[in-house]
Structures are given as structure tokens and as C-alpha cells.
Image: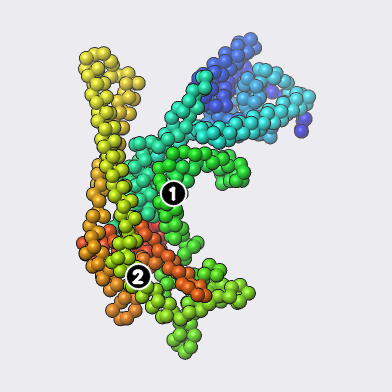
Amino acid sequence: MNAKATPALASPGRAALYLRVSTGRQAEHDLSIPDQRRQLRAYCEGKGIAVVAEFVEPGASATDDRRPEFQRMMDAAAEKPAPFDCIIVHSFSRFFRDQFQLEFYVRRLVKSGIRLISITQDLGDDPMSVMMRQIMALFDEYQSKENAKHTLRAMRENARQGYWNGSRPPFGYRIVVAEQRGTRAKKKIEPDPMQTETVRLMFRLARIGNEDGPMGSRQIADYLNAHGIRTQTGGRWGVGAVHQVLTRETYIGRHRFNVSGKRKGERKSEDEIVEMAVEPIIGEEEFAEVQAVMRSRSPQLRAPRFVSAGTLLGGVCFCADCGGAMTLRTSGKGEQYRYYTCCTAARQGKSGCRGRTIPMNELDEMIVSHLEERLLAPDRLEELLSGLLKRREEHTERLRGRIAELRKQAADAEAKLTRLYEVIENGLADLDDPNLKGRIVELKRIRDAARADADRAEGRADDRGNRLTPEFLRRFGIEARKKIRARDGGFRRSHVQALVQRVEVGTDEIRIKGSKPRLLQTLVASGGGYGVETATHGVRSFVPKWLPGPDSNRRPSD
């Protein structure tokens, strides 16, 4: 601690009052600010000090300087000449709860000829007083950290019991009072009927998409903005907000509390994170499918050079032993012999993976023949899709119930608006009343949002699965078999990879993995033409689409 004396300052004649409370709840209930103001003004009257400015900070922590009123006060203090001679606070902890920051700003004020005065810790400018102020600041800092530790412990326990600790809930949820304990209300979060359909829409667009296949975060944001769907605060959707929704486990019933620290990018350890149960909006199977689709788009996992490669199975063929990619290797004059080889074995030798090499034409023929004989046979297609179609019918029934609920919400809001208008017309209420105005705006928002959600839901209520008749499946299988074989005797890579997402080559067997939702999407998107032209969405995410405008070459879109 530095006990160096500060320069002598003039006797204060003009004062700025700084008043602060730590929480928004204190400011809202007006517990502390009026009392501070009363005591500070009484002190100034007793000392003959004129109050020329007042800076009030409602609900801001004193552990850092990210306080608008505090910064406005410091900017005023830096003016020449200074508009006041001193800043008066109730205690030094009102100014700062960090010893280093307190001394830093005190010295800044001294350079401008301004004193910091605490009415409950009245100290002078001599070395002993400076040392006492520093000791008091250390105790304030220690107490602040202890309070934060105990508060966080209580909040973690509150989360373990399933209660909400505050802040804005995730999109799709709302805060409700679960129980009353004396004067305190214990709150939880539950799905918000006005937003749940939007959450389901976002997952559906990411998993199945539209006619062009699954959408990325940027495309979903564009879709929502184009259809007038707004965020919780009424703003437009961005890539980050959409990605946060699509990756947040809250929507499958597991909300994680205390994930990150106060500093940006600081993540807590797993033993500090509390998982609380909430009512889910999305099924775990659908959530897992969306995560798999998003991972498949990641350049870290599937680079563009593999997706755009000339090999039929580039980017989807892997070694069953080490999980490494099976990449192209050539030999012979003019590279006439082509193989799929384990990349780990090719780089590290047998010590990395015993690996294997298989002729490219042989593996390609085996995969395509399997698709033709097994997957694309009408009875096999019907077997694969029967469960999905059943769930689709169940979803349609739930959607119809949701439409009825939304229509009822819109009708209720409209009826309440009508009654309010009648009250105003009869002279029983004044339209200029701010509370009445706010209520009318809120009811209009509820009515319009419910109608818009119902209209969108009705647009999806048509069960297109009814078109998947046995004749459709038979003709689709025939057309798909044609599409995966090119006229020159080769294969159509984009169509094959629309049906095959992973091939694992082992010693005794070859495993082919695919996605039932992806197959269903291909069937539905092919429509009445019985083709598979939409299968090209398998490579869409890695084809650069440059942005228009003067900065068009800076980065590709999603």
C-alpha cells in the first residue's frame, strides 16, 4: 500500500453527489437511493457546500467502471474548469469496491483538483488518512467477493431445485411464478405459446428445410426476417442468435446454469455448472439430427476439398479401425490405378493404423449396387419410411391442435381489445392513460402474433405424406436408380451422397449409414416428377456464394 500524501486541495464549495445501488431490485423498490440522497444533502447543508450536480446509478456493480453515470461524472470532472470541487458519496464502497480502481480514480480526480469525500468515512489528505482509505477499500473488495461467492452458491442451489434465477429466458420460454414463499416469489420458466412454434420451425428448417434441402443459420435468419418473425426484443434475427437456438440443450429439457464467467469467453468447469430440468420444446431425436447436420457442414470436420472432390465417396468414406478418412491414392503409369486408402496409414504407416486399401471402382460399384438392390426397392423404402410417416401424421394432428389454440388466443385478445374500446367510448377510461395505452399495444401484439403463427402453421398442416403411395415409391425407386448412374457408365456423386452420409470400411464388412429424415426430405422434395434433382443440397453449403456490394470478395455466405 502506498501511503504517499496527496496534494493539498482547496476547500470544497461545490459538490457533485454520486448515488448508487447494487441491484435493480433495490432501485425498483426505491430502498436505498432516497436515503442516500437525504443523508448526502444533509451533510452538504451542515458544511455549507452547494450541490451543483447529481449522478444516480440504479442497479450497477461497483467492482468495475462499466457504469454510464459514473463515466459521465468522470468526463465532467475532466473539464476545464471543473464544474465542481468535490464528489460526495455515502461510503467509499458506493464509489468502488476494488482497491486498485478506487486509488486510480481518486488520483485522476486529484489531478483535476477534485476531492472524493465519504460522509461515513470522513478522512483527510494526510498519509495516515490515505493508508486508512486503502485499508477500507481492501475490506470492501474482500466483502464484495465473499458476497458474490455466497450469492452464487445460493443461485446454484436455486437452479438445482428447478427455479429460475433471473435474467431474460431463452427464446421460446417465459417466466412464471411457481410458488410464493412469504414476500418472495419463486419462479420457473415454461414454453411460451407465442414463440414455441417459431422454435420448432427453426429446427425443422435446419433438419429438413424447404425444396432446396436443409438450411444453414444464415438462411434461417433470412427466412425468419423475410416472414416478419422477430426476436424476443422485436429485433431482426442474426446468424449468432439462430445458431444459439439450434445448439441450446434447453429446448430438449436440460438448461445449464453458470456456464460462463463474468469475463467474455471464460467457461466454468463442469463441476460448477448446474443442470436444471425444464419442459422441452424439441424432441431429443430431432435435436440430435440437427446437431449432426450442423456438424456435417463444419469445414473442420468435412473440408471443401473432400466435398468437391471428383471421387464418388470423397468426404463420406472412413476407416472402421481408426476413423480416419479414406482418401484417393493412385499408382501406375498415368495414375491408371485408383484406390481408397486410410489416410492415417498413408501418413504414419502401420504403426498409426493397420489400415486398408481397396480399389476405387470396386468400392463404388459395391455401394451403388447396394443402394439399387436394397435401399431403393419399393418394399425397403416403405419399411424405412413407415415410422417417419406415422410420426409425421402425429405431428400434423398436434399442429392442428396448435392452430386451434392460436386462433383462440387471437380471438381472446381481440375480445379484450373490444371491451377496452367500449370502456373508452363510454367515458369510463382515458385513452391518454399510459397503463391503458401499454395494455392496448400488448393485446395487439398478442393478437397479431397469434394470427401470424396460426397462418404459418396452417400452411404446413397439409400432410404431403399422403402423396407417398406404393406407385409413387415404385416410380421413385426406378428414377433414383437411373439418377445415381451416369450415362457414361459412371456415377452421380451428388445423388449418391444425398442418400449415403457415411461409409465405414472394415476388414470383414462395410457399413453404410444414412439419415431417414434426409431420405424423407428427398422423397417429398422430388414431388410429382419422381426425380431426385434436389439431392444436390449435399454440397450446397461448401459452394461459395459471394456477397454483393463493394466488399463482395471478403467472405462467402453460409
Residue at 45% across, 34% down:
189
Q: Which residue is mark 2?
A: 374
Instruction: Point out the frontmost of discs 1 and 2.
Output: 2
* Name of the residue lying farthest toward the bottom: 333
Q: Which residue is mark 1?
A: 284
- Give the structural element (helix, strand or loop) at label 1: helix
The total number of labels drawn is 2
Residue at 49% across, 62% down:
301
Dot 1 crowding, Cα within 10 Å, few <14, some 14–19, many 20+: some
Q: Quadrant of residue 377?
A: bottom left
For the residue marked with disc 1, what is the amino acid? Glu
Q: Are marks 1 and 2 in contact (CB under 8 Å)?
A: no
Task: Give the quadrant of the N terminus.
Answer: top right
| Residue 246 placement (x, y as % from top left) | 43, 49
Q: How is the image coloured?
A: rainbow
| Residue 458 placement (x, y as % from top left) | 24, 44
| Residue 285 placement (x, y as % from top left) | 42, 52
Q: Is residue 64 visible?
A: yes
